[in-house]
Image (tube, grey):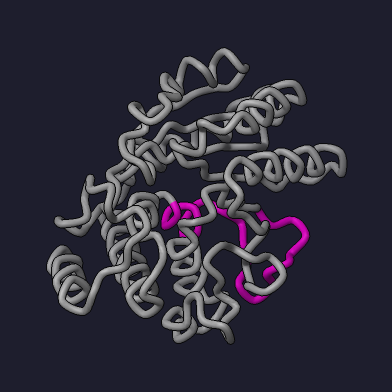
Amino acid sequence: MEQAKLNSLKKTAAQIRLDILEEVHSASSGHPGGSLSVADIITYLYFEEMNIDPKNPKMENRDRLVLSKGHTAPALYAALAEKGFFDKAELSKLRQVDSFLQGHPDMKGTPGVDMSTGSLGLGFSSACGMALAAKIDGKDYRTYTIVGDGESEEGQIWEAAMFAAHYKLDNLCVVIDFNNLQIDGPVTEVMNPTPHDKKFEAFGFHVITIDGHDFEQIEKAFAEAKTVKGKPTAIIAHTVKGKGVSFMENQVGWHGSAPNDEQYATAVAEIKASL
């Protein structure tokens, strides 16, 4: 990856992290930990990978993203705002009664959102339906879905995996955001769903494992996924919950807690210092 491109992606990801913090701080609620862990993946998808047009959000042949771990909507909203789907001023209205930015993604109210999600497990199934529809209709758009590691404890995740492999959905790419923390503690202690790689391989997926904060690895993984024929791809992205904010990193308490004024100021200063 060229240095200029890498620098641009890092700068955009940092801005998205700042936006995430602004959202949850303004709302005094939300899910910063998982939003920050997936920020780099979402940055790459929206600013490099996907064929999308902010001026035409419903473009028929656009690539689709289904945020199956819908509680990390602040990351999705930040990317959509930075990309130009709606005014960034809306971010400070997260979870307010008069806002279209609900606590979980709403495809009917928010420009750029391809599927309403929140009930864990359902988003992956929806993505499978979109990918199959593209096959049936002879369309060449790709569908991406981001699944939480705790979410992968849901049985429906594996039903969807079986479906995707059975229908040879090589236009589908699922990313597992593996930060190893869910609301009740370490994923491997609550209800261990690992090894993700061997399980997805057993279900018939092409599997790639990466550092989910390394843009060069992210780029190579998505490029490789496009070359795979006859089977879907699963990218196991090892990430850090709360990435970018020292006191949030790997701390389960930040799964669903918003920073107070002092914590917000400290977090913003840390991210700005990294630019």
Query: Residue 10, image x and y in percent?
Result: 28, 59
Q: How many marks?
A: 0
> Quick check: 113 left or right of 184?
right
- Asked if residue 211 can be seen in this view, the reply is no
Q: Is residue 61 magenta?
A: yes
Name the image quarter holding residue 189: top left
Quadrant assignment for the C terminus: bottom left
> Quick check: 215 left or right of 145?
left
Query: Residue 139, image x and y in percent?
Result: 79, 46
Give the residues drawn in magenta, as a range: 42-63
Q: In the displayed structure, would residue 136 be above or below residue 106?
A: above
* Residue lying at 41% horizontally and 36% vertically, measured from the top left: 220
Q: Is residue 16 magenta?
A: no
> Which of 108 and 3 lies nearest the eye of the viewer?
108
> Which of 95 and 219 lies nearest the eye of the viewer?
95
- Asked if residue 73 can be seen in this view, the reply is yes
* Residue lying at 49% horizontally and 56% vertically, measured from the top left: 71
Name the image quarter holding residue 221: top left
Query: Residue 196, image x and y in percent?
Result: 45, 23
> Which of 101 and 258 lies nearest the eye of the viewer?
258
Q: In the displayed structure, would residue 12 be above or below residue 40?
A: below
Q: Main secondary structure of the magenta part?
A: loop
Residue situated furthest right in the rendering: 137
Name the image quarter holding residue 128: top right
Query: Residue 70, image x and y in percent?
Result: 54, 54
> Quick check: 174 left or right of 19?
right
> Quick check: 267 left or right of 164?
left
* Residue lying at 58% horizontally and 22% vertically, measured from the top left: 205
* Residue lying at 38% horizontally and 42% vertically, measured from the top left: 182
